[in-house]
Image (cartoon, helix red, strand yellow):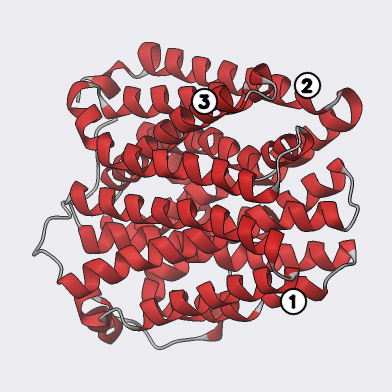
Amino acid sequence: MSATGKSKDGPRPSRRAEYLTYATGLLTDSQSELVSFILPLWGILLGLGPLEIGILVSAKAVLPSFFAIHGGVLMDRFGTRIVLVLMGSACTVMPPFFAIATWFPALLLLQMALGMVMSLCWMGAQSLAVNVGKSDPAIVGRFSFFARVGVMIAPLGAGVMWDFAPHWVSFVTIGAVGLAFWFAVQALPPTELGEARDAASRAPFRMSDILPRLSDYIGAVGLMAIPTVAFVVVVSSIRLSTGTLQTSFYLVYLKEIGLQATVIGTFVSLTQMSAAVGTLLAARLTRHIHPVWAFLLLVTISVALIFGTPVFGDALIPLAVAISIRGMAQGGSQPIMYSTLSKAVTAETQGMAIGLRATGNRLTALTVPVFMGAIAEAWGLNATFYVTGAIMLLVLGAIGVWIGLRHPEAVRT
């Protein structure tokens, strides 16, 4: 699994470009976390059942499942900044409409649309981090850290707003975060991103350029022939399942054991604080463990602890310790994931590779909540943690065997 991409070495970015890149990660990840935290609570308030909540949570992944690759191609084709300017506008306007969307089909459609634009914003922020950071792992690690700071603050703030302010305030605040993201993207210098220079060499714009092309999807799927890419896409999808659980049935579980929204927000913030620490420790871990094994190990720990939540019952201290360790493992795996995928592809296919990984993630986010909701309806909430977690751990074990037997070069390079 050696890297096949070009060297991404180059001059150090300006402080302005570096800090604004960190800001995009912080803002887009915090906005996504706000939506993920508040929407299940909104569903409970509206009287939705577990399956409906699972469908609603997963709806954000419907459109990205089909168009994430196309979004990555558009960033490669037109430049990340211009795509993020457009998506940031949508992330500003759409969230307040949730406050008046009390009909399940309306919520579903709104969640699908917002999920698409937020997914592109997050993909674009990752692309900026790789582009601006070039080969500097410290910049990618700090980007992951600031993204974690955003999701660390967001749940606690969301819990307080939900408990002590009218519910429409929460949705307006989500839109305000989208506006701040838009300003951060607007302030990025196009010349330093190379986009002003590249724009002069591009062919004239045609409307057909914004439509999906079969050749782009074939090219993206073809990247799976690179073992590193296939490994990252699959393990990243399983990694995402832990985050999907935390923003859906984990919240429902905490609510069912009698915790208030503010306390639940504190729990989620705790895991994000631990994750922020994990992002800064990732580079040290990879000095002692090969990145491939480190990524696999950290994801396995994260899966085991979050899906094992019912084991701890309503004991707050064990729950807090488990979610903290899970957060550290989840955070540590993030920069390793980014750097491993970035080194496996060329600079010209960075967006496409990110889109491919996002597609795998979105398919997981689309199917896992519905699967878990169906199990919860049939066998109860605890069973859905155990059954889904066992499946994920079996898949991770199989991937470990695949690496060791079929691609031993992965841990020797």
Vertical order, 31 against 346 (above or below): below
Residue type for callout 2: Ala
Q: Secondary structure at mark 1?
A: helix
Whole-percent x, y for residue 412 in the image:
21, 20
What residue would you read off at disc 3?
Answer: 322
- Badge nearest the viewer, 3 or 2: 3
Whole-percent x, y for residue 107 in the image:
81, 65
Q: Nearer the viewer, residue 195 or 320?
A: 320
What residue would you read off at disc 1?
Answer: 97
Q: Is residue 215 visible?
A: no
Q: Residue at x 71, y 46 (%)?
A: 260
Whole-percent x, y for residue 305 in the image:
54, 23
User: Any mark on residue 388, and which?
Assistant: none
- Badge nearest the viewer, 1 or 3: 3
Residue placed farthest to the front in the image?
Answer: 164
Mark 1 or 3 closer to N-term? 1
- Left or right placement of residue 325 versus residue 279 in this view: right
**Residue 373, located in which quarter of the rendered image?**
top right
Q: Are marks 3 and 2 in contact (CB under 8 Å)?
A: no
Q: Residue at x 51, y 35 (%)?
A: 239
Q: Residues within 10 Å of mark 3 (few under 14, many from 20)?
A: some
Residue type for callout 3: Ala
Q: Residue at x 48, y 58 (%)?
A: 29
Q: Secondary structure at mark 3?
A: helix
